[in-house]
Amino acid sequence: MNYSDIVIDHFESPRNVAGPCSADALNGRAGSRAAGTLVEFCLEVDKGVIGHAGFRAWGCPHTIAVASWLTEQLPGKHVDEVQSLDLDHIAAQLGLPTEKWHCVLTAEDALRDATRRSLG
Amino acid sequence: MKPPIYMDYAATTPVDPRVAEKMAACLTTDGVFANPASGSHVLGRTARGYVETARRQVARLVGATPRDIVWTSGATESDNLAIKGVAHFYAEQGRHIVTSRTEHKAVLDTCAQLQREGFEVTYLVPGDDGIVSPEQVAGAIRKDTVLVSIMHVNNEIGVIQDIEAIGRVCREREVLFHVDAAQSAGKVPIDLDAMPVDLMSFSAHKVYGPKGIGALYVCSEPCAHLEPIIHGGGHERGLRSGTLPTHQIVGMGEAFRVAAEELEAEAARLTALRQRLWDGISVLGGVRCNGHPAKRAPGLLNVCFEGVEGESLLFAVRELALSSGSACTSASREASYVLRALGRPDHLAQSSLRISLGRFSTRAEVDRAIEVINAQVRRLRQIAVCPESSPVATVRDTVKKDSP
């Protein structure tokens, strides 16, 4: 398996690894051990806008990199905006091979899980 | 970038310099290059002498009679020749073979081919320690069983099967017994003179010899008959035709000679290094040794790490050249069939590392490996989501001590 420089960077130095999620933050997760990928996000949201984003991930280097990278992209975005991620854009940004797109899909599911409460 | 620390001796070994030197003397005009089958001139006869010396060296390591050693291209061919050879020769008497689920692919795929040809194969499931019991073998042998094939040392988890006891069962029931000894020759003592084994496969490149050469021991007393799979020229008693590659054979001979000389001291040294490695990484907690803790080859350790994913683990420890418990880091991330046969769930099988030490491994290398593995496992566990503890993810530290 080849990893792009940006994947290696986020794998080696993951950004915003979440500690305990505070009660008023949005917490969501997706994936399973059996599927080989688990992603969890912890989002601090103010008036529908994401402030700080933290993650945890159990999975391949791509999964860790995608989740870590997203925590840098999410702040400033409205929760509505993160309901569906631009798969092609993320795959291109991180140099993901097609067989690793499930990493992004799991991250997307985790974000939807986190934000479903705020969307009512 | 510095080359990684080599800890994959179970995959292959570098050629020992002593071996390379002997091989190089069999290639060019000033060396022993002639065809060992050219009995008409002195050059050919000299080459023949080299081949026979090597045959004695190989035989000596495993306590066999030299004439019972047949040269092949490697353990895969030896396994093919033994299994297909027996099955085809004895097809009139029976078409049933007994083997185990944790055999090397060279055995499993050969058996699968025979199934396509109409043979029946029983695949024994070893205990969760990786060991196949003689009772299991006895229970699987039928009236039409012609062959039992059980490996000596498992290539993934390193457990040593009780070949003597299984062999006795086979002798009692008058069924031929084949043993794949690719991983055990030169590492654990083998005495074919005393062991009830009819056929045994060997490889040179696992014992600091060259790739591309191996041997099959074919017992002549009692006599095991084989139908050859390669025809043309009738070399090797008609069992394996093809010009004998003198340099490869000489390499295997020298490799086995050195192994015989150093086996005892090397086994003690590697067992101590393996123990040091286990002591070093088991402090992490949530670490398990795959396979029987004591019945194992000196340099091989297969460990699963709870709370980390396999591909990330393997990439995180890339300073070390080793194998994962997963078949590969392919998209499918298929877990090892050996670890699955031991009842390990997929995710644990995938987060396993096979660490195999060898002749050139040092204490400093082992210490560095401990440092790297411990740091990376701790790091990955901190990033990981723990499935049982939502929403606050904490690192589960289930300490389970089972020392190999």
Image: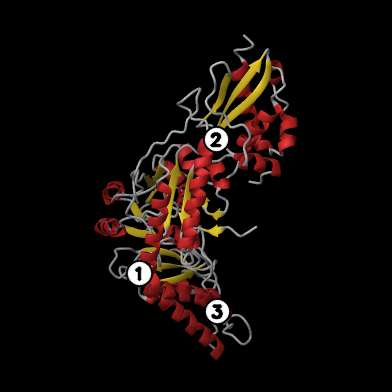
Q: Tell me the CA gap for discs 1 and 3.
A: 24 Å
- At label 3, counting other C-alpha atoms closer than 10 Å, the crowd grade (few under 14, some 14-19, many 20 or more) is few
Residue position marked by numbered label 3 in the rendering: B21
Mark 2 crowd level (few <14, some 14–19, many ≥20, 10 Å Cα): many
Q: Amino acid at mark 1?
A: Glu
Amino acid under disc 3: Glu
Observer able to see residue A80? yes
| x then y, percent, for residue B234 | 50, 73
Q: Going by the image, does A11 lie left or right of B79?
A: right
Residue B222 horizontal/vertical position (percent): 30, 68
Q: Is residue B93 visible?
A: no
Q: Is residue B173 above or below residue A114?
A: below
Chain to which the residue tagged by mark 3 belongs? B
Determine if marks 2 and 1 fall on one subunit: yes
Query: SS at mark 1?
Result: helix
Q: Are marks 1 and 3 on the same chain?
A: yes
